[in-house]
Amino acid sequence: MAPTAKLLLLGTVLMCLCSCMTAPKNIPENATVEELTLLGQQSLDISNYKAAEVYYSTIIKRFGSDITVLVAAEYEIAHIRVKQKKWDEADEMLKRIVSYYEGTEAGLLPPHYKKLALIDLDKIPQKQ
């Protein structure tokens, strides 16, 4: 393949990837938690953190009164912060998630989010 053709192909691929990295503007009002979670996971799979956060934030806004749904969505956003190395934000969010397990509703919560939050907390560099 000629160098010019390779360059054009590479440019096209990069433009496609960049155009996919935008946040969704219209999320259907009738989307379920499961559908929004799937969209969030698909966004994470392609490292589109902005879109993933929009989906998880939508879950919190629409379904956040359910503590099990809230913990899951908050954990996913906190995990995004860890991936972005936004340590202060991640630390605050992860500690809040762990604190849910110290409350009266702890028995209702899926235990794996506490474990995952503690694992992510261990990834945060300690301040000297």
Image (cartoon, rainbow, N blue to C red):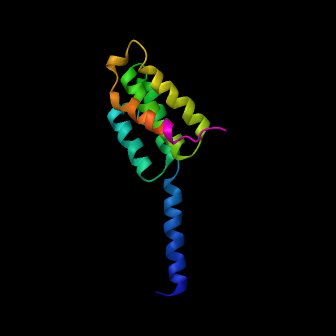
Residue positioned 46% across, 31% down in the render: 74
Q: Position of residue 15 (x, y in %)?
A: 53, 64
As drawn, the residue found furthest toward the front would be 128
Q: Position of residue 16 (x, y in %)?
A: 49, 62
Q: How many marks?
A: 0
User: Residue 75, located in which quarter of the rendered image?
Assistant: top left
User: Residue 111, located in which quarter of the rendered image?
Assistant: top left
State yes or no: residue 126 in magenta. Answer: yes
Q: Viewer-proximal residue, 46 or 36?
A: 46
Residue positioned 32% across, 35% down in the render: 34
State yes or no: residue 16 in magenta. Answer: no
Left or right relative to 54: residue 125:
right
Left or right relative to 128: residue 5:
left
Q: Position of residue 118 (x, y in %)?
A: 45, 33
Residue positioned 49% across, 60% down in the render: 17
* Image vertical order of residue 79 relative to residue 17, above or below: above
Q: Viewer-proximal residue, 74 or 87?
A: 87
Q: Is residue 20 visible?
A: yes
Q: Viewer-proximal residue, 90 or 9?
A: 90
- Magenta part mainly helix, strand or loop? loop
As drawn, the residue found furthest toward the right would be 128
Q: Position of residue 69 (x, y in %)?
A: 38, 26
* Image vertical order of residue 18 relative to residue 89, above or below: below
Location of the C terminus by quadrant is: top right
Q: Is residue 55 visible?
A: no
The residue segment tinted magenta is 121-128
Residue positioned 54% across, 78% down in the render: 7
